[in-house]
Amino acid sequence: NAGVTQTPKFRILKIGQSMTLQCTQDMNHNYMYWYRQDPGMGLKLIYYSVGAGITDKGEVPNGYNVSRSTTEDFPLRLELAAPSQTSVYFCASSYLSPGQLNEKLFFGSGTQLSVL
Amino acid sequence: RKEVEQDPGPFNVPEGATVAFNCTYSNSASQSFFWYRQDCRKEPKLLMSVYSSGNEDGRFTAQLNRASQYISLLIRDSKLSDSATYLCVVDNTGGFKTIFGAGTRLFVKA
């Protein structure tokens, strides 16, 4: 009964380092998303994917990259980490496309990332 | 003006109280509306969708007012376990525009 699994849960990076946040889902959902949540702010969409091999930018894509080689996995890559990327990152998936009534987002448990 | 605005609270209420949250949205073309619940340091989870005619799920009632562009969430007979942040979510068509409000914090006290 895994749902959406994210790793790691916590990470501290130095400025300029790179890392990959892993996300995998076992619900066979086509739609997957990466969000970031800053304190006191709503979730902001970084990147999304509508299926294997198809990705597109969200609202705040700068400094990030993604790939979707399989239906299950949607890793998020941070290149040249900056303090502005300190945030909580959530991966999510859905069966229906956004906007459809009863569309439900399933979230991973999040990654707390600090860039110092 | 933010696309989705919520009163950040916090709302401090005693057990058994009725509490209501409002959320306004700026895009009149918005199509779908949701309330998510987020516990401290946890992921958001869908609480309920909001239908045009209004809908109820146990102690929770959601309403949509398209003319005034707001949605509301009413919680009756509050429980300690209702303490959380409630996120208003609005979906717009024409692209992946799911907008999350910043959330309203609720504390229910014994």
Image: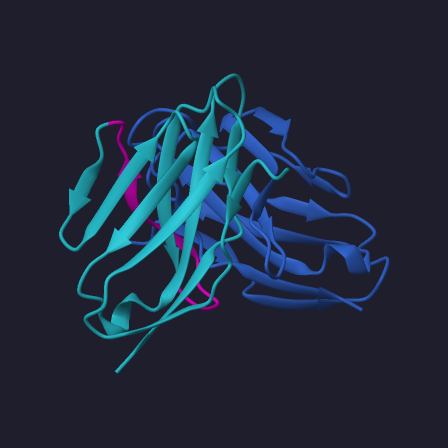
Chain colours: A blue, B cyan
On screen, residue B24 versus residue A38, left or right, reads: left
Q: Is residue B82 above or below residue B109?
A: above
The single residue placed furthest to the bottom in the displayed view is B110
Please name whichever residue, B109 or A73, is drawn nearer the observer in this view of the structure: B109
The residue segment tinted magenta is B39-52
Numbered circles on residues, count: 0
- Can you give x and y, in whole percent of width and height, for residue A23 in the image? 51, 48
- Can you give x and y, in whole percent of width and height, for residue B13 in the image? 32, 72
- Can you give x and y, in whole percent of width and height, for residue B32 in the image? 37, 28
Q: Residue at x 46, y 46 (%)?
A: A24
On screen, residue A64 versus residue B88, left or right, reads: right
Q: Is residue B32 above or below residue B107?
A: above
Q: Quadrant of residue B89?
A: top left
Q: Quadrant of residue B48?
A: top left
Residue B87 appears in view = yes
Q: Is residue B107 above or below residue B48?
A: below
On screen, residue A80 versus residue A102, left or right, reads: right
Please name whichever residue, A37 or B100, is drawn nearer the observer in this view of the structure: B100
- Can you give x and y, in whole percent of width and height, for residue A26 in the image? 35, 43
Q: Residue at x 38, y 26 (%)?
A: B66
Q: Is residue B93 above or below residue B21?
A: above
Quadrant location of the C terminus of chain A? bottom right
The single residue placed furthest to the front in the displayed view is B68
Q: Is residue B26 magenta?
A: no
Q: Is residue B46 magenta?
A: yes
Q: Residue at x 23, y 68 (%)?
A: B17
The single residue placed furthest to the top in the displayed view is B94
The single residue placed furthest to the left in the displayed view is B58
Residue A71 appears in view = no
